[in-house]
Amino acid sequence: MIAADLFVGMTAVVIGLASLAAAIGNWDLLYQLPKLRWIESRAGRPAARLACVLLGAACIALGVAIACGSSLLRA
């Protein structure tokens, strides 16, 4: 395991957890981001929250895979 992989993986996990916390907590600060504002204006707040949850889960999964040194991610 390379230290850089561990750092990048843990950073992705922290970002994913923050995204999940913001979506679950319905933080207004998160919905001021331009892309989420666009989703919210088109489909409503529940769809924007779902997008944040999915993005957070994907970041966590990717971060764990990177930190564990998954060979699937190596080119």
Image (tube, rainbow, N blue to C red):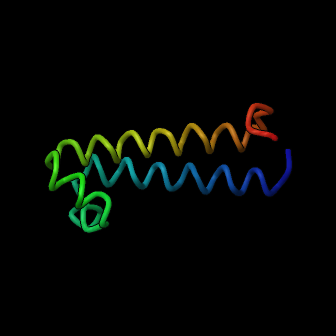
Extreme residue toward the top, this view? 72
Q: Nearer the viewer, residue 32 or 75?
A: 75
**Quadrant of the image for the C terminus?**
top right
The number of callouts visible is: 0
| Residue at image point 25% right, 68% down | 32
Q: Is residue 43 left or right of residue 14?
A: left
Residue 15: % across, % down? 50, 56
| Residue at image point 24% right, 58% down | 38
| Residue at image point 18% right, 43% down | 46
Query: In the picture, residue 72 is in which quadrant?
Result: top right
Q: Above or below — where is 20 with respect to 4?
A: above
**Quadrant of the image for the N terminus?**
top right
Q: Above or below — where is 57 with respect to 10?
A: above
Residue 47: % across, % down? 22, 42
Residue 43: % across, % down? 16, 45
Q: Is residue 5 left or right of residue 30?
A: right
Residue 69: % across, % down? 78, 39
| Residue at image point 54% right, 42% down | 60
Extreme residue toward the right, this view? 2
Q: Nearer the viewer, residue 23 or 71?
A: 71
